[in-house]
Image: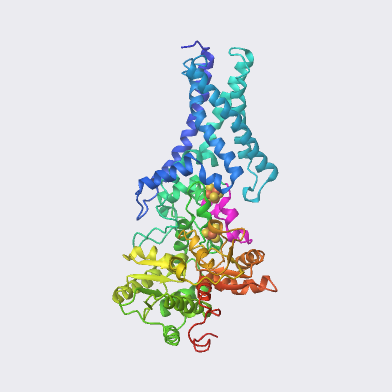
Amino acid sequence: MQSVPIAQIAVLVVAGGLSLSLFLARLWKILFQIRHARAEPGYFIGHIGARIGTFVWEVALQAKVIRGRPAVGLAHALVFWGFCAFAVVTLNHFAGGFGIPFLDRDSLAGSTYYWFAFFWALLVAVAIAGLTFRRFVLRPKWLEPISYESGLIAFLIFTLMATFAATAWIDEGTAMWRVNWWLHTAALLVFLPLIPNTKHLHLLLSPFTIFLKRSKFAQIPPLSGDEDFGLVSGKDVTQPVALQAFSCVECGRCMEHCPANNTGKELNPKLIALGMRSYLNEYGVGSESPIVGATISQQALFQCTTCGACEYVCPVGIEHMPMIIGLRRGEVNTGRWEDEHGTKLFLNLERNGNAMGFSASEREKFIARQQLPVFDGSQEYCLWLGCMGAYDPQGREIVSAFAEVMGRLGTSFGVLRKERCTGDPARRLGNDLVFGQLAEANIASLKQSGAKKLVSICPHCVRTIAEDWREFGADVEIEHHSEFLARHRDRIPHSGSNERVVFHDPCYLGRYRGVYDEPRQVIATWAKVVDPPRARERSFCCGAGGGLAFLGEEKGQRVSQTRARELAATGAGVVGVACPFCNSMFRDALQSVSPNPPQLLDIAQIAARGWGIADATPRGSPADRGIV
Ligand code: SF4
Ligand code: SF4
């Protein structure tokens, strides 16, 4: 034990005690909020192996952060790894302050660790200087408004690294050494309580948030009964929601990728997470005050296309979809959301079983005109039409082309006599009553038909049937037609055109289902595939999801036009799509952004070209098929 002045010990005890108390007091309040939030129905910590894998990849290796923004991500990763290396240095620093250091620079182990930490101090100092330059000089818009608290934290981290590195040149015991030692100590004591009081709380929480994420992407938790209206007030906030709200690091990655925010809408997914945090700070988990209107805007909530880009890119495991849909549920179930288009949509779904309000006989007429076989249990596949495939003119074209291709491939299929909307728009808009009615009616029809394998042209139907219907006991095997076509691509005649097709990844096929290569493989049977600047996981939404296709005309700059402009700018002669909603959105958008717009084709229509069916209208004339 080294001898240290008693005054030093006294100052360390008082200042250290104060710093630690401020740290613990705030942390205790936050943990109280998380612990006293209600348990989430259906949440379970399974798949431990997968969770550990995610933890190693996203936390220990910082791979998600680096992949998302390579230069900035690497700088952040260096700071994180440096912090890990510095944990031992910090403990030794305080132990030394009391005269009981455990790392002796004169020993081999102590000296090795010292130079290891020295190396990290230099890297962290450079990285933090770079991050500060970016935040305060380059000022990307998703980091606004300027946070002076971030500036203070960056200054403290830089001070910690500089004062540690300086010890390589300062002799121990000198006056200069003592000044440097106290500077380092002061920076640590100020930094500690700032952690739980600022966005740096993510240092403590995000490893847990990432490890405890729900097991599936964009998973919507079930309601716990008739009395559960969704996320209405503090009483409804669940533990995952509270933990995630406090974990936001305010990096703005979600905002950078949000189609609504990119087109000037009020919605900013960062402010959904921060709005929830503000609510918990101000009102708390037991409060009965409504969340929407207090710290989160209703208008913003209903501008979300549920594209999932925010949730996909968030580096700390915040799941925006359950938050946004939970809040929408609250607004719909308490009658606070009054929207003429929304009311009409729900009525259409309840009365007619489809989102557009057509009579079911229109679907029957289409099936008869197209001579689509009815599923009778003898066929291999049940072809699920969906609202778009059954009623939308262009959706019908896609179904026709796909039916033709299935026929050419010798795959037997049939369509259900009765089919209602899967409930996707109701589910995403927060109307679980209507969603449940539709899901149950469809599940009963499917059971009665004996269908075991489904295929659909609509990624929204695929997602809803495969995942959302599970809540009602369904376990249906369904695939998207891109998966079916890709599996049979060797039997699709390769026509070898010089055409260039720019493929738009639909959100519900890509991010939601992880299907990226299959539609490209289908296009490659006919033409060269081109990617737009934002492709695959980073694809930019068409603007139709989350029920927004049925909520009337979009105000201001349109998401579909922004994307159409990007697709047209590639110079490709054809825009390839794999979702009837994207098709419907780009139909007008491409016309409006280009005097000579590229052709718009679904992958089924592209596959049909292999057999020379260029117009993708295989059965009967357009008039016969009821297409106007
Ligand atoms: S929600 Fe996630 S992506 Fe968005 S600002 Fe917060 S930490 Fe960043
Ligand atoms: S799901 Fe898409 S539209 Fe909705 S908040 Fe996230 S990024 Fe924005």
- Magenta: main secondary structure: helix
- In the image shown, does 463 or 453 lie closer to the viewer? 453
477 to the left or right of 601: left
Residue at left 35%, top 63%? 470
Using the image, determine if residue 595 lies above or below residue 359: above
The answer to whether 284 is drawn above or below residue 468 in the figure is above
Residue at the extreme bottom:
624
Quarter of the image where the C terminus is located: bottom right
367 up-or-down from 529: above or below: below
Residue 298 coordinates in the image, percent (x, y): 53, 61
Residue under the image location 44 percent in, 56 percent down: 217
Query: Horizontal and vertical percent for residue 616?
Result: 52, 79
Residue 93 appearing in the image? no
Can you give x and y, in whole percent of width and height, for residue 307 in the image?
A: 52, 61
The verdict on residue 296 being magenta is no
Q: Give, as a single range, the part of the protein colored magenta.
A: 251-275
- State left or right for residue 435 relative to residue 534: left
